[in-house]
Image: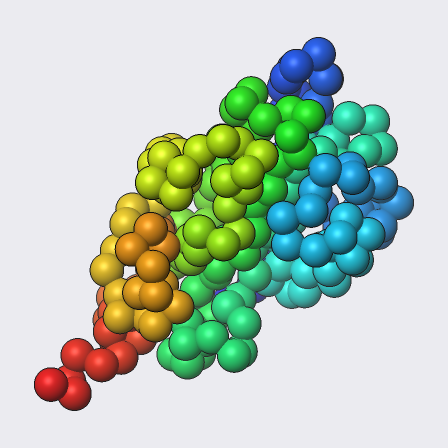
Amino acid sequence: MIHTKRYAQRKLTVCGHELLIEGPVTPEALAALRFDEGLTAFREPAEQHRALVEIAGLPEGRIIIAREDDLVLAYVTFLHPDPMERWSEAKLDDLLELGAIEVSPRVRSGGVGKAMLELAFSDDAMEDYIVISTEYYWHWDLKGTGLDVWQYRKVMEKLMGSVGMLWMATDDPEICSHPANCLMVRIGKRVKPESIAAFDEIRFRYRHMY
């Protein structure tokens, strides 16, 4: 299931920075931009920049960014789950993973993350997808924000909840490895019942083993 990616944009002023929130961006457009040095949550900025260009080139890949001129200060990614993760086992074409969301410290606390998600889900095509986000505390910038894991989780739940994503239980070992980790899910209005049933099966792989 590959839909046309409807491009959208909006402007946002944060901490004196005039940001353009836009996407899904093409790999060519993204490759021509610079990555802020504060975007280090997952990889070094240059490496993450290259990874995002690859994602933007995938048929299902969607990258939403916040930039000031040619400098990317925040981004959010959507793509099919990694083949090594359990979420890919059902082979659902209508399952997307919100793979990463990161905002540079220079523009935090200004609603940038929420604005990117709102723009992403303003595309009606997202109603055809189950969208998941696997929240792991080891990806959170606890040091930079000064928050503890529970405070940070509350922030993430509020952020994801702003676009209709809800906490769902699972027996996935990585998520269950720490009580602050969680699975957030948004099921689009047009998702087929059989896809929802298949997704529920992979949420609880071990339910029939007891």
* Front residue of this view, candidates 67 and 4: 67
Q: Is 104 positioned to the left or the right of 3 in the image?
A: right
| Residue furthest right as drawn | 32
Q: Which residue is more in the foreground, 5 or 67?
A: 67
Asked whether the viewer can see residue 27, the reply is no
- Residue 60, compared with residue 146, is above or below; it is below
Q: Picture coordinates of residue 192 (x, y %)? A: 30, 64
Give the residue at the far left of this rendering.
Answer: 210
- Quadrant, the C terminus: bottom left
Q: From the viewer's perspective, is residue 114 above or below residue 83?
A: above
Q: Is residue 79 left or right of residue 47?
A: left
Q: Position of residue 148 (x, y in %)?
A: 40, 38
* Residue 86 quadrant: bottom left
In front of the other: 175 or 165: 175
> Residue farthest to the bottom?
209
- What is the number of callouts on the image? 0
* Scheme of colours in the image: rainbow
Write down the quadrant of residue 149 in the picture. Answer: top left
Q: Is residue 147 visible?
A: yes
Q: Position of residue 47 (x, y in %)?
A: 78, 57
Q: Is residue 34 left or right of residue 207?
A: right
Q: Quadrant of residue 39?
A: top right
Q: At 33% across and 40% down in the image, what residue appears?
A: 150
Q: Residue at x 65, y 20 (%)?
A: 11
Q: Position of residue 20 (x, y in %)?
A: 70, 26
Q: For the point 49% across and 31% down, which residue is it?
A: 146
- Does residue 129 lie above or below 157 as drawn? below
Instruction: Please name the residue shown 63% across and 48% down the image.
Output: 41
